[in-house]
Amino acid sequence: MDQSQRTKILAALEDQDTTVTITDPLENEMVLNMGPQHPATHGVLRLLVRLDGETVMAVVPELGYLHRGYEKIAENSTYHEFIPHTDRLDYLSPLSNNVAYVLAVEKLAGLVIPPRAQYIRVLVCEMARIASHLVAVGSMAMDVGALTALLWTFREREKLLDIYDVLCGARFTTSYARIGGLQQDWTAQCTTMLNTFLGEFEQDLQEVYRLLSTNRIFVDRCENVGYCSPDDLIAWGVTGPLLRAAGVPRDLRRDRPYLVYDQLDFDVVTLPESDALARFYVRMGEMRESAKILRQALDLLPEGPIFAEDSKRVLPSKERIYTKMEELIHDFMLINLGIDPPVGEVYAGIESSKGELGFYIISDGTGHPWRMKIRSPSMVNISAMPMMLRGAMISDVVAIIGSVDPVMGEADK
Amino acid sequence: MNDEMLGRITAAAGEEPVEVTEFRGDTTVVLSPSALLRVAECMRSELSFDLIIDVLGVDMYRPDKRYEVVYVLYSISRKAYLQLKIRIDEEHPEVPSVTSIWPGANWHEREVYDMFGITFTGHPDLRRLYMPEEFEYHPLRKDFPLMGVPDSLPLPRR
């Protein structure tokens, strides 16, 4: 720029009548693609966000990046063969998925499970709920910027995974439940480890609670964020902690008790606010209630068999397979041809950590299900997410995703 | 399922036949597609089945009425489940959408459309849910092979 140009511009700027117009590229709405490879979307969730400045105008979630076709696989495998696949649905709480699936198959086959197995199933379901909620709370705190809480909750979760390891030999993909029973019996070592865990858990949870509930940044970022009215949540079929954080006390453990939940004393935690902070408090409360259930179930745990008595449907013990001819034949037939439940169709759902996890099984009388539908709570919760996100700020999007706690393995099936 | 509920459902269905089946404590009401919307509206407003749990398609793979669509409903006040089922032909796999009654049926119906190719008339946003939009097949139909169709999904070139 030479001297004459500069003088000209300076003269124009000093002149009060000259107006300078700048076209603002952001004054229009823009579409932001968030995910599927985004650290705060908890896996491969993809959101198409329409923004006006920093305000979210509309959101369209896109699924399918983790679709593995489990329903097709189920139609082509026997009922036993599908159990390991249920681990990979909600991979944060594999034990309760195993139990949900075998409960549906047992309802179809009409099997009655001995009380010890039922109590052990309650134990593993509640352990899974605590393990899952710990991740939900920790990662939600991490999404809004508090990394310490994640480390503390994962430290607690680690203790539970150690119990899984002793119980069934796997920390993550447990495949613990069997049709009509369980893979292994609950041992005294598990009781000791769980008692140790429960002894420290209240206090450790209280530490996390104090760290977050009195943290100005965490509370400010979560309070009044992601509101959705209870009527809208019900209309969209949302279940689980999200619905309870909106003041609707729906909990299948109490409303339609399965296993032995009707013999246990626990409260259904509800809060009226229906925002991200309320969802955090509900999850914290549910972990305390789960710890309460675990203590009662440990006290009440009866002695006895862990397998139902139906040699045509239930796998025999390994010891008997190797020593008895009849059990060897049964094992061969059950593994190769399946359990042959009667013709019919059933739906069975449990209250998993994300909401209602259900299996709808249609049997044609053979060893393979004719059709098996997985009712995944995460998918339904994600479908309600646009309502929570509308009108929020772009920085709140991660807080809301964290409060919904979607697991894509389950949402995509 | 008590008589009062059955009475209301048959009244809402009008002339159309209603068949009730029970298995292991689960009640299923089989309807004809034309009665679906009337019965669904009655279920939600009169019988307080306010939560739609699931909508699933079934391929029965038979010459007559090949497909079925099942609606799993739950009532928070009654604490009860109920299934509605409709059977449809292979030639015109069309069902009226219940999204106007339960908005939550939106994604479930998209999934059924994706997996079975059943179209839901009146659906606000009938796109595939899991598979890519340009995919030509409907994977959960019984005539779709387990291993998939070769070259049906374009893969990125090296």
Image (cartoon, rainbow, N blue to C red):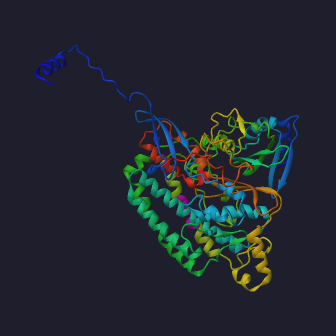
Q: Is residue A185 above or below residue A42?
A: below
- Is residue A289 shown in magenta? yes
Q: Which residues are magenta?
A: A285-292
- Is residue B6 shown in magenta? no
As drawn, the residue found furthest toward the top would be A17
- In this view, the residue in front, A128 or B91, is B91
Q: Main secondary structure of the magenta part?
A: helix
Q: Is residue A163 above or below residue A89?
A: below
- In this view, the residue in front, A136 or B154, is B154
Q: Is A141 left, or right, of A351 in this rendering?
A: left
Q: Is A81 left, or right, of A408 in this rendering?
A: right
Position of residue B100 measured from the top left corner of the image (x, y, whole percent): 68, 34
Which quadrant of the view contains residue B63?
top right
Which quadrant of the view contains residue A190?
bottom right
Can residue A223 be spotted in the picture? no
- In this view, the residue in front, A244 or A135, is A135
Position of residue A244 measured from the top left corner of the image (x, y, whole percent): 58, 51
Q: Residue at x 47, y 71 (%)?
A: A200
Position of residue A392 measured from the top left corner of the image (x, y, whole percent): 46, 39
Q: Residue at x 18, y 15 (%)?
A: A15
Q: Is A58 left, or right, of B151 in this rendering?
A: left
- In this view, the residue in front, A110 or A271, is A110
Can residue B147 be spotted in the picture? yes
Q: Is residue B37 above or below residue A74?
A: above
Which quadrant of the view contains residue A256?
bottom right
Q: Is A101 left, or right, of A404 in this rendering?
A: right
